[in-house]
Amino acid sequence: MTLPTIAVTGATGFIGGHTARTLAGAGLPQRLVVRNPERAPDLPLAEVAVAAFGDRSGVEHALTGIHTVLMVSAAESANRLDEHKAFIDGAATAGVQHIVYTSFVAAAPDAVFTLARDHFATEEHLRGSGMAWTILRDNFYLDFMPMMVGDDGVIRGPAGNGRAALVSRRDVAAAAGAILQHPAAHTGRTYELTGPEALTMAEVAAILSSGLKRSIRFHNETVEEAYASRKAWDAPQWQYDAWVSTYTSIGSGAMAQLSTSVEELTGRKPQSLAEFLAAQTEPPTLAH
């Protein structure tokens, strides 16, 4: 068996898992870096290594012999940036040459969407690591739009008439899979990954109404109302800030820019929200 030179993190999740399946379908050996080996997908030419992002020595061991890594950003948490830095440092020590990182559109130190600030800091740490890099700046995932609907059929948040160029996780994974098959061609590139249209939240509600066969509408909260309504859930302050700034970032216009990168990388047009809903074999679960 040919030793793998590509590693995929997050292989037990959607983006990492679908990217790994793309590589397996292309006949490429790969190493799946996971926290729980029992949940790793069983794929041809794939081997499994165990490491958590924040465990620098574990990451170093898991990535020894690997040239290129897909670094799917860690789960949202108060210490995610520290975990990202530990992973990048461990990868560099292991001899990794190239990291492909899933970041976020409009990442900046003062980004309106608070979680995008950690993504920017991660990008900067990666650029200073000495390794080659490719950055995928994803827009909000259209897959999650049904989860923004309350039990009463209302999407609430201070988004105003702002627009978001929502992208499907399927298209992000397909783009990552294409890059990993020819990583050298994408060295030093930053790709904005968006869907085919920029939608207001009122338009999102209308599309969800049609696709889910129920009445859904958007209510434009003030920022103060948004914080107050989310106090119904016990959460740390950074989580409240992230929830509310999801909407204020849309209202700011930062999420509206469309890109052709998905089609350029994958050879197919990106999926729309209506197409995503139509492709579901079961209706997406509605949640707060």
Image (cartoon, grey):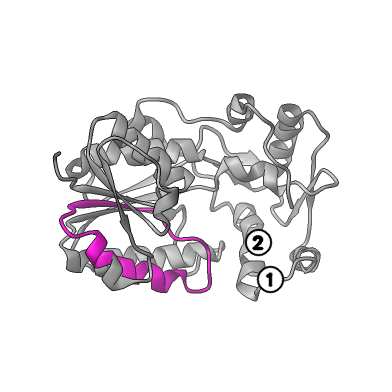
Towards the viewer: 194 or 64: 64
115 left or right of 62 in image:
right
Name the residue beneath numbered marker 2.
Answer: 243
- Residue farthest to the right, as pictured: 152
Could one spot residue 16 in this view of the protein? yes
Residue at 20% from the left image edge and 66% from the top image edge: 92
Percent position (x, y) of residue 76?
53, 63
Residue shown at the point (47%, 56%) measured from the top left: 106
Examine the rendered structure and indicate whether residue 58 appears above or below residue 158: below
Which residue is the extreme one toward the front? Answer: 38
Q: Where residue 25 sits: x, y (%)?
A: 31, 29
**Measured Cα–Cα span from mark 2 to mark 1:** 10 Å
Which residue is at a point 22% across and 51% down the rendered structure image? 68
Q: Residue at x 47, y 48 (%)?
A: 13
Q: Tell whether position 72 is magenta.
A: yes
Q: Which residue is mark 1?
A: 235
Q: Is residue 77 magenta?
A: yes
CB contact under 8 Å: marks 2 and 1:
yes
Question: Along the horizontal axis of the image, is 272 left or right of 27?
Answer: right
Q: Left or right of 99: which side holds 136? A: right
Relative image position of residue 271 (x, y in whole percent): 51, 30
Residue range corresponding to the magenta coloring: 59-87
Secondary structure, mark 1, is loop
- Residue 125 seen by the camera: no
